[in-house]
């Protein structure tokens, strides 16, 4: 655990330095009309701990001190980064969790199915589909699904799925109607991430499953009287899951990148959207905070994937 | 046996797999039947179709296999039945045991769960009851602490234990028929004896009939009642074991029996090798599949495939598929009549000089045992080799035998590294490796070369033969014209054609590849060849040829061999002296006849008694010493005599006072038998035990 916290620290600091070096908050004032006097700009920047005239190590020290005390600093608009983050984290996590969990589950199922039906029509169809998804940029996929959702609504003559926003304002919070409404908003953006996870996972799962399909223990399982389908699910699939744990961490990072575009296109106000905005606004503190968020996520995913691997594989457990 | 209905009746079974090179005819026209309670054997080399045919019976072949013929079990046809029907029979009335029990058990479930699952598939019992039954079965299969061990995973079991677990699983539902597919092939001989013993006990307990599939005619001889010999997918001869072993009526069977080295034969008894290798199963030419290798072939053989017909002279159910079997029967022809007599290889001991090529004294190799992925903690020491002496003289073959884990591989790795051993000394041609400079080492390396078990793993498949053979010569700076000349010479020496230099390893059969490895090892004219299980990856009919070649080369070139093997009959056949290893020590050593005819150490006695003989009558009459348990961990060897935990003498013959000595005092190798002989054994109570 200490080790993991240490890694988060390093990753976050690295993001801070990178952001502080690459982003130039001073330029935000350049376009103002009338241009504010330099002293005002300096004062403004200093109050945000963004003044490039202060040595970077000093700024970093101040920032790090805040972070260690649970204060992530101020955004470029003088709001609290903590507060902004609090608002947005939930939005993103919902998408990310649903996307990665359902994506990997569907991917595992699809991959296993593909392997069992190797070289049959459904396998070829699955292969084609996943390569298509993997090769299309997320933006394109998201726009495509947004449009497809609209056409779908038109076709059935009823607005079943929404392609903008998180919910329709004005409904009583957490009433039945509100929950349904939120779900209706959730479908399309999640689907983008699920499809990506599915495409990603199904390829690995298919290979891993093919490796065990011909193995002796599946034959033994059948020889003791299990039906082929039972042998496949209980023995082959269970064993073929082991390597999947490892991919979980990678996939999670991938999905976060995907979610940036998804949030943007479906107008969700999550971390991904914020990330793009912060960079546009040269907001160093916000960017560093988002970097920390991603680091925590990825490390957590990595930790989770270790846990999954160890749970799945008794050979590692007792070694 | 009462004339009841056959339990299993296989008629004209054929199995074909589609492949890119055309259909592979894995089994063609196999018929046999199994009566209740009997052991029916199917023997054959790899690719003979013996395993495929049994998978076909179980309905376990991949869907792309095309199966024809008929398989009747208790009068009911099995072929063509759906997975649902068959799964009711599989594991219930018919159970199966596979060769490699590590890959045959699912790695992620405990052994107990896997056996309980077999119980629950066929019986409606609670999970707890099934688990209790699993523990009971494990106990029956001779697994100590069954309740605790049932919670272990397959990788925590030794090979023998896993096979016991497989047998426990097989008898879970009191089957009528057990199909055992090479059940002991991956195991050491003493473990093999345990498992065969257990199989017979399981057979008695359940009254099941057994279909025994193996390539090992020694195992078969003592185990089966009747036998079918398969070759290239076809049954070539079938009958009672006695008929087949003592009155074989077709050249392949005769050749096969003549090509197996026997532990009860005097060393140097010639083996009759079968030339060539089995045919490819795609596009089989018409006629007898054995034609290209058969010394008795006539024109007819190439055109018409002989049917399996009854032999009149011997037992009532003796069949052979050969155009000339009537003639063989009439004239009572044997291997020596049919196969070209191999060159005379009577041992010329005068060639063995007193000059040692290799001398090892007090060699020890200990490995640290560590645990923990990040922080390595040393938790013990593995005493892989713990103080051994060996000497090989010029022109001599020293056989080093022992089961896996005994330290033989470590020993040869130490020798080949030519480094300063951590303890003890290695002397090559009278020079200690310890004081050598890199230059010396490079020079001395010419004198020792090695041939490994798996020829495919030790040669680069992307290199043509000429490059493979030239490699060692290039390293040692042999000039180009000399190299070219030598390559031709080497190929001829190992019985390959010099024209083959531009071919690639894939174009050769397993036996030929091993010949290439031998040729490469000889390239620099070494004095000593280390042969690490050189024939154990080869099919029986090919082994004899390679063994004969090794003997010829030795006689011709005056080589010395360090022959490492687990197969005692091979070692007996080829060695002048042997050393038997157990748990990092040499427990007995001496001239091969002395050791094999009068084994003094209880371990040697057990090893010899466990080695199967291709001779049904002798096999049945033999008293087998079945050792208990597995090899103890080399990290924590028993006090006193390392063998005492498994020693049959310790367990059955000694009194408490005598036992105490075994527990307290580590026995040293000391002279045994006639004074002056170099027969030595490391046992306080060594004796002149007589084999058989
Ligand atoms: S049929 Fe001909 S080739 Fe075949 S085994 Fe008999 S003699 Fe040999
Ligand atoms: S010393 Fe004792 S335990 Fe060891 S082999 Fe001899 S009799 Fe057996």
Image (cartoon, rainbow, N blue to C red):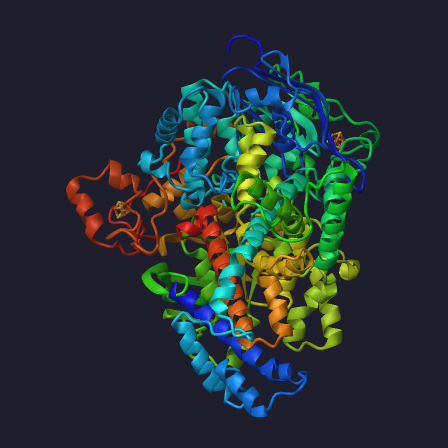
Whether residue B366 sits left or right of residue B229 in the image: it is: left
**From what the image shows, is residue B398 above or below residue B84?**
below
Horizontal and vertical percent for residue B45? Answer: 63, 37
Horizontal and vertical percent for residue B339? Answer: 68, 38
**From what the image shows, is residue B238 above or below residue A217?**
above
Whether residue B191 sits left or right of residue B39 in the image: it is: left
**From what the image shows, is residue B436 above or below residue A304?**
below
Whether residue B673 sits left or right of residue B514 in the image: it is: left
Residue at image coords 65%, 51%: A189
**From what the image shows, is residue A236 above or below residue B428?**
above
Residue in front for this viewpoint, B632 or B83:
B83
Residue B43 is at least partly visible in this image: yes
Residue in front for this viewpoint, A111 or B27:
A111
Residue in front for this viewpoint, B359 or A141:
A141
Residue in front for this viewpoint, B400 or A308:
A308
Whether residue B339 sits left or right of residue A292 in the image: it is: right
**Displayed quadrant of residue B692:** top left
User: Most extreme residue toward the top, as rendered?
Assistant: B3
Residue at image coords 67%, 23%: B329
């Amino acid at each position: 655990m200490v080790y993991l916290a240490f890694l988060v620290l390093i990753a976050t600091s690295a993001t801070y330095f990178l952001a502080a070096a690459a982003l130039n908050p001073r330029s935000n004032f350049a376009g103002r009309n009338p241009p504010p006097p330099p002293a005002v700009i300096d004062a403004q920047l200093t109050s945000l701990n963004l003044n490039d005239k202060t040595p970077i190590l000093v700024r970093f020290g101040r920032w790090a001190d805040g972070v260690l005390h649970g204060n992530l600093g101020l955004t470029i608009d003088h709001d609290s980064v903590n507060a902004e983050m609090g608002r947005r984290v939930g939005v993103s996590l919902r998408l990310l969790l649903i996307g990665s969990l359902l994506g990997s589950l569907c991917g595992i199922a699809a991959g296993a199915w593909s392997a069992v039906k190797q070289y049959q029509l459904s396998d070829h169809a699955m292969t084609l589909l996943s390569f298509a998804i993997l090769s299309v940029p997320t933006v394109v996929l998201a726009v495509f699904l947004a449009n497809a959702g609209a056409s779908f609504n038109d076709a059935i003559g009823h607005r079943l799925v929404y392609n903008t926003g998180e919910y329709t304002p004005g409904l009583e919070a957490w009433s039945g109607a509100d929950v349904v409404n939120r779900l209706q908003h959730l479908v399309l953006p999640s689907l983008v991430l699920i499809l990506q996870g599915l495409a990603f996972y199904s390829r690995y799962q298919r290979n891993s499953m093919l490796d065990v399909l011909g193995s002796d223990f599946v034959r033994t399982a059948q020889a003791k009287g299990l039906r082929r389908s039972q042998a496949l699910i209980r023995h082959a699939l269970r064993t073929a899951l082991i390597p999947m744990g490892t991919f979980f961490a990678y996939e999670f990072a991938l999905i976060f990148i995907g979610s940036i575009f998804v949030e943007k296109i479906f107008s969700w106000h999550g971390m991904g959207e914020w990330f793009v905005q912060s960079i546009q606004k040269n907001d160093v503190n916000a960017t560093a905070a988002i970097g920390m968020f991603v680091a925590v996520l990825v490390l957590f995913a990595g930790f989770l994937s270790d846990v999954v691997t160890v749970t799945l594989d008794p050979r590692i457990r007792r070694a | 046996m009462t004339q009841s209905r056959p339990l299993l009746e296989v008629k004209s079974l054929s199995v074909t797999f589609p492949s890119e090179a055309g259909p592979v005819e894995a089994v063609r026209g196999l018929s046999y039947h199994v009566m209740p309670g009997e052991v029916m054997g199917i023997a054959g080399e790899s690719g003979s179709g013996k395993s495929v045919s049994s998978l076909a019976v179980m309905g376990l072949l991949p869907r792309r296999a095309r199966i024809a013929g008929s398989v009747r079990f208790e009068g009911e046809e099995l072929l063509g039945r759906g997975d649902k029907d068959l799964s009711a029979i599989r594991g219930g009335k018919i159970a199966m045991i596979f060769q490699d029990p590590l890959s045959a058990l699912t790695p992620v479930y405990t052994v107990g769960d896997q056996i309980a699952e077999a119980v629950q598939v066929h019986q409606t019992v609670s999970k707890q009851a099934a688990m209790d039954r699993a523990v009971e079965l494990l106990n029956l299969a001779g697994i100590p602490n069954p309740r605790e061990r049932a919670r272990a995973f397959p990788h925590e079991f030794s090979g023998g234990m896993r096979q016991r677990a497989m047998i426990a699983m097989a008898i879970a539902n009191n089957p009528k028929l057990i199909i055992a597919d090479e059940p002991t092939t991956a195991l050491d001989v003493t473990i093999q004896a345990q498992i065969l013993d257990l199989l017979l006990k399981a057979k008695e307990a359940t009254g099941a009939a057994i279909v025994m599939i193996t390539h090992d005619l020694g195992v078969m001889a003592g185990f089966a009642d009747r036998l079918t010999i398969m070759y290239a997918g076809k049954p070539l001869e079938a009958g009672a074991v006695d008929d087949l072993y003592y009155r074989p009526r077709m050249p392949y069977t005769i050749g096969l029996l003549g090509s197996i080295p026997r532990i009860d034969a005097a060393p140097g008894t010639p083996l009759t090798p079968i030339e060539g290798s089995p045919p490819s199963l795609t596009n089989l030419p018409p006629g007898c599949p054995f034609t290209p290798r058969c010394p008795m072939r006539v024109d007819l053989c190439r055109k018409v495939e002989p049917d399996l017909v009854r032999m009149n002279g011997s037992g009532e159910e003796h069949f052979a598929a050969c155009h000339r079997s009537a003639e063989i029967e009439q004239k009572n022809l044997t291997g020596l009549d049919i196969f070209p007599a191999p060159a005379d290889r009577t041992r010329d001991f005068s060639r063995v000089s007193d000059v040692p090529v290799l001398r090892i004294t007090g060699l020890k190799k200990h490995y640290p045992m560590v645990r923990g992925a990040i922080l390595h903690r040393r938790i013990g020491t593995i005493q892989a080799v713990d103080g051994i002496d060996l000497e090989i003289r010029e022109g001599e073959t020293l056989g080093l035998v022992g089961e896996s884990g005994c330290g033989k591989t470590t020993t040869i790795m130490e020798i080949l590294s030519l480094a300063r051993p951590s303890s003890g000394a290695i002397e090559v041609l009278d020079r200690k490796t310890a004081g050598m400079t890199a230059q010396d080492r490079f020079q001395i390396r010419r004198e020792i070369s090695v041939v490994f078990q798996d020829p495919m793993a030790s040669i680069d498949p992307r290199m043509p033969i000429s490059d493979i053979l030239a490699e060692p010569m290039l390293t040692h700076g042999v000039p180009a014209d000399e190299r070219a000349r030598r390559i031709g010479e080497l190929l001829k020496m190992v019985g390959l054609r010099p024209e083959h230099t531009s071919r690639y390893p894939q174009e050769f059969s397993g036996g030929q590849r091993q010949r290439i490895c031998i040729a490469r090892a000889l390239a620099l004219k070494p004095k000593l060849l280390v042969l690490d299980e050189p024939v154990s990856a080869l099919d029986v009919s090919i082994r004899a040829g390679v063994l004969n070649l090794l003997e010829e080369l030795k006689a011709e070139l005056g080589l010395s061999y360090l022959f490492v093997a687990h197969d005692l009959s091979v070692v007996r056949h080829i060695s002048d002296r042997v050393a038997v290893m157990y748990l990092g020590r040499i427990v007995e050593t001496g001239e091969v006849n002395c050791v094999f005819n009068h084994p003094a150490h209880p371990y040697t006695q057990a090893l010899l008694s466990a080695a199967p003989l291709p001779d049904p009558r002798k096999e049945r009459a033999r008293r087998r010493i079945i050792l208990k348990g597995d090899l103890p961990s080399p990290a924590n060897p028993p006090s006193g005599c390392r063998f005492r935990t498994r020693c049959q003498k310790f367990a059955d013959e000694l009194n408490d006072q005598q036992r105490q000595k075994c527990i307290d005092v580590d026995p040293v190798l000391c002279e045994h038998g006639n004074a002056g002989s170099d027969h030595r054994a490391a046992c306080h109570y060594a004796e002149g035990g007589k084999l058989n």
